[in-house]
């Protein structure tokens, strides 16, 4: 798994994170999940599991959009003025998710 760059985020990298999440392939010390609702999971993900206490703040923050126990979309929180998001192609034109993304 490659760390996401702060200035550039590729669609393939976001898609890869969704696939790894759905496979349950993140190491348990590499991800901390918080279920925010039935359809959203907040995940702090480290490129490598943190070794030192100060490493705990070096994670990237993602929101996974969940449908039927599977991630179908992802939002990469890069701070106050910058987010990147991706929906799996089969879900992009679903009315319920279009409305959520416009909020």
Image: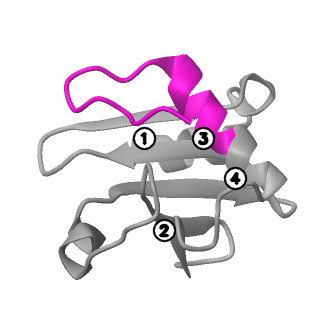
Mark sitting earlier along the chain (1/4): 4
Numbered circle sitting on residue 102: 1
Q: Nearer the viewer, mark 2 or mark 3?
A: 3
How many numbered markers are drawn?
A: 4
Q: Is residue 88 left or right of residue 61?
A: right
Q: CA distance from mark 4 to mark 3?
A: 6 Å
Q: Is residue 25 left or right of residue 52?
A: right
Identify the residue at image location x=25%, y=60%. Answer: 58
Identify the residue at image location x=40%, y=36%. Answer: 3
Q: CA distance from mark 1 to mark 4?
A: 25 Å
Q: Which residues are magenta?
A: 1-18
Residue annotated with mark 3: 17
Secondary element under disc 2, as helix, strand or loop, is strand
Q: CA distance from mark 2 to mark 3?
A: 13 Å
66 shown above or below 56: above
Identify the residue at image location x=12%, y=42%. Answer: 81
Residue 9: x and y in percent read: 36, 23
The front one of 91 and 12 is 12
Mark sitting earlier along the chain (2/3): 3
Q: CA distance from mark 3 to mark 1?
A: 23 Å
* Magenta highlight on residue 77: no
Secondary element under disc 4, as helix, strand or loop, is helix
Proximity of marks 4 and 3: CB atoms separated by less than 8 Å: yes
Residue annotated with mark 4: 21
Residue 50: x and y in percent read: 37, 68
Residue annotated with mark 2: 42
């Amino acid at each position: 798994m490659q760390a996401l760059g702060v200035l550039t985020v590729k669609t393939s990298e976001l898609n890869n994170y969704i696939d790894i999440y759905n496979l349950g392939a993140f190491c348990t010390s590499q991800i901390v999940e918080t279920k925010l609702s039935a359809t959203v999971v907040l995940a702090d993900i480290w490129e490598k599991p943190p070794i030192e206490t100060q490493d705990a703040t070096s994670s990237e923050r993602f929101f996974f959009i969940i449908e039927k126990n599977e991630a179908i979309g992802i939002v990469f929180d890069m701070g106050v003025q910058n987010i990147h998001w991706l929906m799996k192609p089969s879900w992009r034109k679903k009315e319920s998710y279009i409305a959520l993304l416009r909020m």
